[in-house]
Image (cartoon, rainbow, N blue to C red):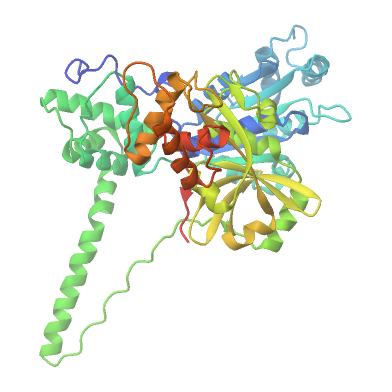
């Protein structure tokens, strides 16, 4: 109804998981990387657990996971967890297309058929994954049966990888003493949180652009209200934004502001009265404080002892990332061992690299060109040089004879934030050289057709791309229509770029300089700024 009015080809805020509208925030990329890591671990077995509030995108991530799984993977997806243990094994067999006629209703018969299939898949080099959605609704018996499925193994390898997707209640369930055996087998955990204000704005703009809208109808205040009323939960953003567009069309308003968003939220969300109470409670408290201060001043001037002011409400702080000492970090590295595949998977996920482009194992080998438009570099740098790129990097850590790989997530004035095997840690910057000698691996995207090396005298689309990137840095000449040449002026500009990034200033665009040029591109993942 409102599509033509706002210049849209289709409804931008449908709640169906259309892959064209997928928006991956930093948290969603982290969550997807955890899932891919869990599948990629293969024979190490265990469970992968992904939890999150209703509407935060767990099911959408499971769809993305299915699209990025390697070709040698077979998947059983259970969407209805309210099954008995026998029904659950039966549904798993059906998902894997097993012939179970004559065995239905028999737990032993079904388990034997599944075990035979898993052994045959192992012999063929296949990987089998069971994904259970809405796992918080599983009964205790069903959870125990799922745990027993991980006992299907060879002497050296687990035959089935299990991924549990669920609401926060799933975490509470797995903390029960009777499920401790299952909880101990969870090798990767991630809790998906809602979008923040900036991500909510980017999410709305992304969906509007995909739907064909060239002009953003939501005002800055409207977007802020959309974030406040939805709490950053994508599904609620969709519901409120869709109703707001409908209301704007009915009122013939091209711009959708705070008032229209609030009205739409009141109509679509339950408990809106509680929202307004929370929103204006701070103003009521402020009015009470002002009145108390005024009364106190009057009593002071009229020699009466002032009444004591009420104590302010406590401030709720976000849970900080663990801050570790060097001794604690070295102990973790000694216990963890090498984590090359995990760190590489995380880095690929941040660049949204699918399995059709490159495999994780190929990425760890770090050929200069992993795929068309996807480059890789192994190099050495100081922390200051690495931070200038403002891109996540895999750092090679060393503790004694043990090597480990950590993902550089961000940095502040005193700390750097690393992720090691799924755990984010804040380490004092001064302590990092004790475990990191400077070796790193970087992955980044460039337009297809940009060569790995460019020098004076070369021509082609890669030169035009380099000029455009340099223009963002030095405001010099950008690319123009027609052939682009690597001339003396461009060589001098490249040297200045190399000096700025601490690269050998030879005027040649090699892998390190290419990475520096890509760092000038506004797209792609960035390092976080830690608060310290």
Pick the residue in front: 318 or 364.
Answer: 364
In the rendered structure, the answer to whether residue 158 lies left or right of residue 289 reads right
Dividing the picture into quadrants, the one containing residue 376 is top right
Q: Residue furthest bottom?
A: 303
In the rendered structure, the answer to whether residue 387 lies left or right of residue 327 reads left
Pick the residue in front: 424 or 177.
Answer: 424
In the rendered structure, the answer to whether residue 194 lies left or right of residue 425 reads left
Give the mark count.
0
Above or below, comparing residue 253 to residue 184 in the picture: above
Q: Picture coordinates of residue 236 (x, y %)?
A: 35, 34
Dividing the picture into quadrants, the one containing residue 266 is top left
Q: Residue at x 22, y 17 (%)?
A: 3
Above or below, comparing residue 120 to residue 53 in the picture: above
Q: Picture coordinates of residue 341 (x, y %)?
A: 69, 35
Q: Picture coordinates of residue 283 (x, y %)?
A: 21, 60
Q: Residue at x 10, y 25 (%)?
A: 252
Q: Is residue 92 among what the camera can see?
A: yes
Above or below, comparing residue 111 to residue 337 in the picture: above
Pick the residue in front: 81 or 515.
Answer: 515
Q: Is residue 25 among what the camera can see?
A: no
Q: Residue at x 38, y 17 (%)?
A: 483
Pick the residue in front: 109 or 22.
Answer: 22
Q: Picture coordinates of residue 328 (x, y %)?
A: 69, 60
Q: Residue at x 66, y 37 (%)?
A: 342
Q: Residue furthest right?
A: 155
Placement of the N terminus among the 4 image quadrants: top left
């Amino acid at each position: 109804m409102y599509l033509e009015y706002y210049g849209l080809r289709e409804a931008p805020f449908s709640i169906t998981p259309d892959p064209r509208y997928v928006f991956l925030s930093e948290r969603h990329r982290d969550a997807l990387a955890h899932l891919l890591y869990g599948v990629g671990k293969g024979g190490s077995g265990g469970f992968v657990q992904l939890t999150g509030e209703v509407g935060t995108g767990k099911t959408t991530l499971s769809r993305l996971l299915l699209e990025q799984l390697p070709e040698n993977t077979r998947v059983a997806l259970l969407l209805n967890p309210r099954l008995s243990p026998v029904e659950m094994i039966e549904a798993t067999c059906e998902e894997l297309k097993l012939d179970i006629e004559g065995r239905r209703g028999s737990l032993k018969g079904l388990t034997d058929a599944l075990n035979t299939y898993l052994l045959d898949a192992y012999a063929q080099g296949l990987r089998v994954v069971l994904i259970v959605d809405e796992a918080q609704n599983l009964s205790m018996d069903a959870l125990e049966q799922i745990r027993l499925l991980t006992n299907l193994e060879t002497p050296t390898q687990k035959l089935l990888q299990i991924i549990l997707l669920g609401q926060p209640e799933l975490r509470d369930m797995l903390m029960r003493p009777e499920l401790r055996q299952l909880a101990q087998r969870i090798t990767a955990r991630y809790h998906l949180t809602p979008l923040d204000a900036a991500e909510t704005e980017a999410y709305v703009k992304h969906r509007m652009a995909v739907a064909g809208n060239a002009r953003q109808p939501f005002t800055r205040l409207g977007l802020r209200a959309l974030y406040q009323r939805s709490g950053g939960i994508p599904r609620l953003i969709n519901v409120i934004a869709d109703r707001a567009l409908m209301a704007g069309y009915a009122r013939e308003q091209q711009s959708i502001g705070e008032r229209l968003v609030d009205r739409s939220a009141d109509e679509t969300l339950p408990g809106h009265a509680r929202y307004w109470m929370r929103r204006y409670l701070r103003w009521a408290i402020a009015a009470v404080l002002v009145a108390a201060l005024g009364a106190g001043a009057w009593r002071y001037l009229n020699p009466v002892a002032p009444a004591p002011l009420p104590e302010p409400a406590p401030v709720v702080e976000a849970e900080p990332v663990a801050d570790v000492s060097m001794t604690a970090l070295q102990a973790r590295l000694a216990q963890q061992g090498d984590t090359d595949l995990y760190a590489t998977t995380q880095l690929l996920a941040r660049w949204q690299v699918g399995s059709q482009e490159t495999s994780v194992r190929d990425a760890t080998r770090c050929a200069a060109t992993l795929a068309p438009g996807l480059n890789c570099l192994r190099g050495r740098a100081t922390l200051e040089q690495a931070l200038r790129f403002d891109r996540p990097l895999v750092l090679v850590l060393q503790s004694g004879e043990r090597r480990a790989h950590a993902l550089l997530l961000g940095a502040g004035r005193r700390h750097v934030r690393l992720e090691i095997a799924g755990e984010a840690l804040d380490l004092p910057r001064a302590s990092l050289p004790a475990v990191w000698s400077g070796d790193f691996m970087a992955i980044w995207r460039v337009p297809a057709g940009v060569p790995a090396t460019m020098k004076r005298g070369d021509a082609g689309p890669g030169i035009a791309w380099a000029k455009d990137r340099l223009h963002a840095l030095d405001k010099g000449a950008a690319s123009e229509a027609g052939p682009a040449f690597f001339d003396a002026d461009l060589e001098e500009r490249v040297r200045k770029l190399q000096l700025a990034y601490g690269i050998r200033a030879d005027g040649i665009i090699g892998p390190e300089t290419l990475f520096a040029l890509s760092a000038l591109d506004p797209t792609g993942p960035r390092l976080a700024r830690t608060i310290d």
